[in-house]
Amino acid sequence: MKKFLIKTLVFLAPVLVFVVLCEMGLRTRESDYKYKSQWLTENASTVEILVLGSSHAYSGINPTAFSRKAFNGAHMSQDLNYDAFIFRKFAPRMDSLKYLILPISYFTPYWRLEETPDKGRVKNYMLHYGCPDHPHDLRYRVMIYDGLRPKMALGSLLGMESPRFFSDLGFLTDYTFQKRKENWRETGRAAAERHTDGSLDEDRYDANLGHARSIASLCEKKGVVLILLTTPTYKTYREHMLPEQHEKMLEFCRLVASGYPNVVYLDLEEDGRFQEDDYYDADHLNERGAEKLTSILDRFILDLT
């Protein structure tokens, strides 16, 4: 038995070393999560406009187009739970913050990252932002749980840089007009279906409403204006929305805005100023659309002042 155990350990040792090297490589590799957490740690006190939210904000709001110092803290598929966590973490250092922009999309009231195909992103909040959620769930505490990705990991260990897909101020630079696919209009149906929760789960709705209200409450205490924003989407996305869910999204925004005097809601979902050339796909803006949306937001903020 002892010899068997020794042989087993000898056999497994290279595998364990390989796994540890992959984990180390993935943790040292630059990512938008790692970068944004570090940037906010070092620069939170300088930010006047903070953007949170999911990819609709990530690709749709470019901080360089604001008149004030802004930063985009959005991530792909980010839900309101992690929006609230990031804001709570850095709010005590944000002495200059005047405006928080929080996109509320068709899916937002029912979106919980852990229950989506993108749940592999959850670990980034634990490992890079220090989120205390899931303390005993190994899937969300190691980088390799959703795949070893050895080439990426070992490349990081060898000092090989991965392509950068976001700007210094957190804007997604990868969704460009030039990279747009010919069938971008047809993405609307699949995206809307992916974002539809046919059950209209009340528990998720109430939980997300609680997260949004906690953000609004903290903004009120800090004297910050919270701008709830529904970003522009193309007609092929809107046409495949579930009407009941869309109405619940509007209700969600009304409930948050009516409860706090510092909250305003800006609905640009069907705004006619956005044309086909402004979209990357049916529910995301490209860099042209982002420039336009951010300029609109900048003017909106100036009018609030």
Image: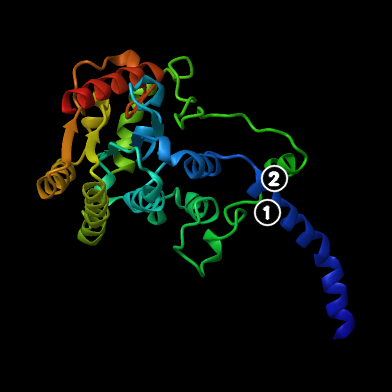
| Residue found at x 90% / y 81% | 3
User: Percent from the top left, x then y, of residue 38?
Assistant: 53, 43
Q: Is residue 75 visible?
A: no
The C terminus is located in which quarter?
top left
Element type at mark 2: helix
**From this viewpoint, which residue is outermost toward the left?**
258
- Callout 2 crowding tier (Cα within 10 Å): few <14, some 14–19, many ≥20: many
Q: Is residue 65 visible?
A: yes
- Apparent side of residue 208 relative to residue 83 in the rendered image (left or right): left
* Rendered view: 196 above or below 272: below
- Apparent side of residue 72 relative to residue 36 in the rendered image (left or right): left
Three-letter amino acid code at the position of disc 2: Ala
**Residue marked by disc 1:** 23
**From this viewpoint, which residue is outermost toward the bottom?**
1
Q: CA distance from mark 2 to mark 1?
A: 7 Å
User: Percent from the top left, x then y, of residue 86?
Assistant: 40, 49
- Apparent side of residue 43 relative to residue 23 in the rendered image (left or right): left
Residue 106 vs residue 255, the one in the foreground = 255
**Residue marked by disc 2:** 153
| Residue found at x 41% / y 22% | 64
* Rendered view: 243 above or below 305: below
Find out whether the residues at labels 2 and 1 contact each other: C-beta distance under 8 Å. yes
User: Percent from the top left, x then y, of residue 132?
Assistant: 46, 62
Count how many numbered circles sit on residues in the image. Answer: 2
